[in-house]
Image (cartoon, rainbow, N blue to C red):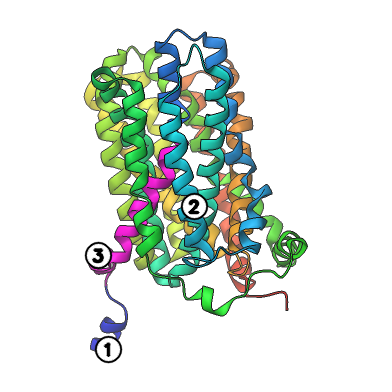
Amino acid sequence: MADTARTKKPGALKIIFRNPQMAWMLMFGISCGLPYILTKSPLSAWMTKEGVSLKTVGLFALVGLPYTLKFLWAPILDRFTLPFLGRRRGWALLFQLFLVATLVALSFCNPLQDLKLIALIAVLISFFGASQDIVVDAFRAEAWTERELGLANSVHVTGYLTSIRWIGNALALFFADYIGWPNVFRLMAAVQLLGVLPSLFARESLMEQKIRPPTSLTNAIYLPLKDYFSRRGAIEVLVFLLLFKVGENIASVMTIPFFLKVGFEQKIIGAVAKPFGFFGILVGGMLGGILMVRLGMLRSLWLFGIFQGLATFLFAILEWTGPNTAALAAVITIDNIAIGMGTSAFATFMMSQTNKAYTATQYALLTSLMAVPASLFGAISGYLVEAMGWTEFFGFCTVIAIPGLLLLLRYPKWESSAPRTASDT
């Protein structure tokens, strides 16, 4: 019996390294992270380098709005299926090809002469990137068993954060000095093209064979909301989603200003933050997936949530040590391990709250909602620091996570009303 059980339930490492589908999840993660970051730091750096005013550069932050509003058109992607590659991968392929085309088009613009055109292209990149997120998230939720989903999410998150923090940020900035920004965006378009591979070859979701899409656009909008809010504990889950990562999100807005106030030079911050942060994300993402298999969802959320809060408070240590490079490396590494673990578990939990018939719409709504407290509290983080001081600020960011953790005491109620697959027959 023990041998049979082991055959049916391979270890986490075997699932990751022996299942070729995990490689596709990593590539999907890279493909999703790239358009998100390219309209931020690299685009800002290019415009600044070409002499565009800082006020105009700041206004370009608005081009990222599609990522906040993606729930508005997610029902369309739930309702309609393209005549190739299935309900999710067909849309993913289409958006990836659009992304490649818009990135190439961006590379032929001049920031001083084509500013309005650049703004339009950047909005399109954000729209296509957010749309790709919708269908890839839905595909991931539908393509894996409950036991494998945590691992698939951890691999996807690792690819996503690698793309954001390394490929589309550090490497893009590095190559810009050698080949120029137009060629950098062409290079990033080539990297984006790699996302086509999982769209073509990833395992088709078994759910596509069992579930019909909503029969009308009205149903695609109404039924997901009706399904979600008819569950016991639906509002509690939303509050939990708002609070679980709020402390970490508030703290992240102030970390670089804090490092500078402590006395670290910019070159030291860059030299330490990129490699150690990247290492931490890799370790945290993979470790989070492995532990979720062993511990289950509830214990993982407790453990990762507590670790996340403690890691946030570790920043306060730097105020006591001063500009100590070893301490900076340790704090950044631990914080990014916590982020990787917490994000993997959080994404898996959100997917567990979606009905497979309406995955795209419900998951897009939950992820959009999750971003609200980060934006609101992030906007006042500077005022909080001035009112409290740095140590007290990071202590506040730790304490504010406690209400979210306490809501996990209600987890059995949420689990008992977990979504069931439905259709609008």
- x, y percentage for residue 134? 55, 53
On residue 4, the disc is 1
Mark 3 and mark 1 in contact (Cβ < 8 Å)? no
- The C terminus is located in which quarter? bottom right
Among numbered discs 1 and 2, the one appearing first in the sequence: 1
Q: Residue at x 49, y 52 (%)?
A: 94
Within 10 Å of disc 2 (Cα), the crowding (few <14, some 14-19, many 20+) is: some
Can residue 223 be seen here? The reply is yes
**Left or right of residue 310, residue 57 in this image:** right
Q: Position of residue 33 (x, y in %)?
A: 42, 42
Residue type (three-letter) at the residue carrying disc 3 = Leu
Along the viewing direction, whichever of 263 and 7 lies nearer the viewer: 7
Q: Nearer the viewer, mark 1 or mark 2?
A: 2
Identify residue type, mark 2.
Leu
Q: Quadrant of residue 186?
A: top left
Image vertical order of residue 102 relative to residue 253, above or below: below
Count the marks. Answer: 3
Q: Nearer the viewer, residue 417 or 193?
A: 193
Q: Where is mark 3, residue-wise? A: 13
Direction from residue 347 to residue 120 in the image, left or right: right
Q: Which residue is mark 2?
A: 94
Sequence-wise, which precedes: disc 1 or disc 3? 1
For label 3, the SS is helix
Q: Amino acid at mark 1?
A: Thr
Left or right for 284, reference 345:
left
User: Residue 323 at what x, y percent from top left?
Assistant: 29, 16
Residue 298, can we see it? Answer: no
Nearer to us: label 2 or label 3: 2
Q: Could you tell me residue 294's position as x and y percent?
A: 34, 67
The magenta-colored residue range is 11-37
